[in-house]
Amino acid sequence: MMAMWKKVADDNYAAASTLVQSSDPKYCRSAVNRAYYAVYARAAGALMKRGVAMPVDREGPTHAKLPSLIENHLIAMKGSRWTVSEYVRRLYKFRLVADYRPSDDMGDTEARNALTLMGNVFHLMKGF
């Protein structure tokens, strides 16, 4: 299962990067969405690798609980686990706007910010 989460994370990372690099404004919301899911999958795999049980009816953690799971179970990351959980919170907020608030602006700046957060999370979680 952990290998599957890694593939999902890597696929979404590549998709988010490609969408932002296209510089087409119609893909900004999709880029934000993929950036969040890359981070979600990366964290889910790391949590499963450390034996964290997932809800019975899910293969991954709930979105609401993901930041606290990172804080409580990825303790080997030391201080960076707090940074990762904050980045996950920010990306989730971006994703909610991208997916559910079409009247709110979601442009190149937001897509690039999401991509930066995604890259930072992957960097901080290297080896996890």
Image (cartoon, grey):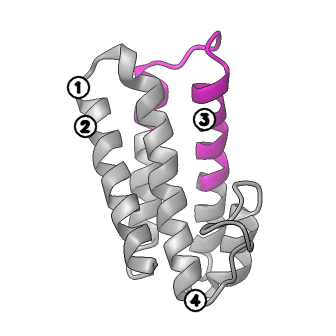
Q: Tell me if label 1 and label 2 are in contact, CB under 8 Å.
A: yes
Identify the residue under disc 1.
22
Q: Position of residue 108 (x, y in %)?
A: 40, 22
Report the quarter where the C terminus lies.
bottom left
Q: Would you say residue 9 sits in the magenta stretch?
A: no
**Tag 2, which secondary structure?**
helix
Mark 2 residue type: Thr
Q: According to the image, label 2 marks what residue?
A: 18
Sooner in the amino-acid sequence: mark 3 or mark 1: 1
The span picked out in magenta is 88-113
* Whether label 1 touches label 4, CB < 8 Å: no
Q: Residue at x 38, y 15 (%)?
A: 26
**Residue 90, relative to residue 80: is it above or below?**
above
Residues packed near mark 3 inside 10 Å, few (<14), some (14 to 19) or many (20 plus): many
Whether the residues at callouts 2 and 3 have beta carbons within 8 Å, the answer is no
Which of the 4 quarters of the picture holds residue 78?
bottom right
Q: Secondary structure at mark 4?
A: loop
Q: Which mark is residue 50?
A: 4
Residue 53 visible in this rendered orientation of the protein = yes
Q: Provide the major secondary structure of the magenta segment.
A: helix
Q: Disc 2 and disc 3: Cα gap in Å?
A: 18 Å
Marks 3/4: CA–CA distance: 28 Å
Q: Which residue is under mark 3?
A: 94
Residue 77 in view in this figure? no
On the image, the x and y values in percent for residue 6 come to 38, 69
Which label sits in the foreground, 3 or 4? 4
Q: Which residue type does callout 1 highlight?
A: Ser
